[in-house]
Image (cartoon, grey):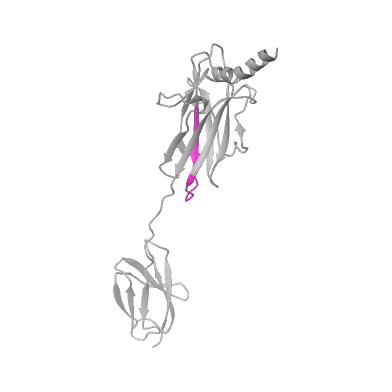
Amino acid sequence: MGKIYLCLFLLFPFLQFLAQDNIAIYQEGQNTDLSSGIAPVSINAPSGATLDVPFEIHNNSAINQKWRITRKQLSVPAGWTDGLCWGHASDPFGGACYSSTQMTTNPWTSPGGAGVLFDLLPGEYGKMKPDFNPADGVSGFGHYRYYITNSAGLAYLDSVDVIIDYVAENKTIKDPVHVAIVPNPADDYLQLSSSNSEMLPFKIVDVMGAVLMKDVLSGSKKISTAEFKSGVYFVCFENPSNKPFTRKVIIRH
């Protein structure tokens, strides 16, 4: 009797493997069976926008199946979000879809209500479409595992891993423009000089906010102050490449 139990114990992993062979997992458009976690699917995310990675989950058994999907976040950078759609291949709407605000637990399993469970006949397949949204400016690797789960949501039957590699866009920031205004205080004129030849629209306003003149600075500009009364004024620059900035000037006649 002990030998029988020993044989059954040794055969169990093999029988379990055979059971898993009743499920085939393909990345959409590919012909490599990824079931039994044979290899992760690695994707380079092109940008911080949402990225879809669709799969086909095939029923290769001789009986109807009702499967659910369990998503487990193995390692995910802070701020990243993900969603999931799961439905029959014939569903023109892609099945039931769930957003990150619904998938709040880890692991998370798709609902098992009558309205979302569906039959997969022998030879049919379901479409699983996880989506990923890396956070802006947060580079890293997101490692996710998707389990094919029984209708009760308790038994993991098979799985496939997805690894998202995202490199945040490095935006080139131009050196800030430096503007000198001399003399300050001024009597007859103001000499405006910028550190480059970039076109800088500007306006001069008084302490009440009234606009006295508008012009464009490109390198250097001399402005007569004959029409300005003695007092405090502000030169406001609109910089297309950086933030707007303001310089205070004093005019004394």
Residue sticking out furthest to the front = 3
Q: Nearer the viewer, residue 252 or 40?
A: 40
Q: Residue furthest right?
A: 1
Residue 75: x and y, percent? 55, 41
Q: Is residue 170 above or below residue 83?
A: below
In percent of width and height, residue 106 lies at 61, 37
Position in image of residue 86 (x %, y %): 53, 27
Q: Is 249 rendered above or below residue 164?
A: below
When the figure is inspected, residue 22 is found, relative to residue 177, above or below; the finding is above
Q: Quadrant of the C terminus?
A: bottom left
**Is residue 108 or residue 163 the one in the foreground?**
163
Q: Residue at x 49, y 16 (%)?
A: 124
Say which residue appears at 54% left-offset and 43% top-offset.
76
**How far across and down, in percent of the image, does residue 177 sit?**
37, 68
In the figure, residue 155 lies in which quadrant? top right
Instruction: Give, as a single range, the part of the protein colored magenta.
Output: 128-140
User: Which image quadrant: the N terminus?
Assistant: top right
In the picture, measured across the screen, residue 199 lies left or right of residue 108, that is left
Q: Residue at 44% x, 36% y: name it.
A: 42
For the question of whether residue 118 can be seen, the reply is no
Task: Please tell me whether residue 227 belongs to the stretch shown in magenta.
Answer: no
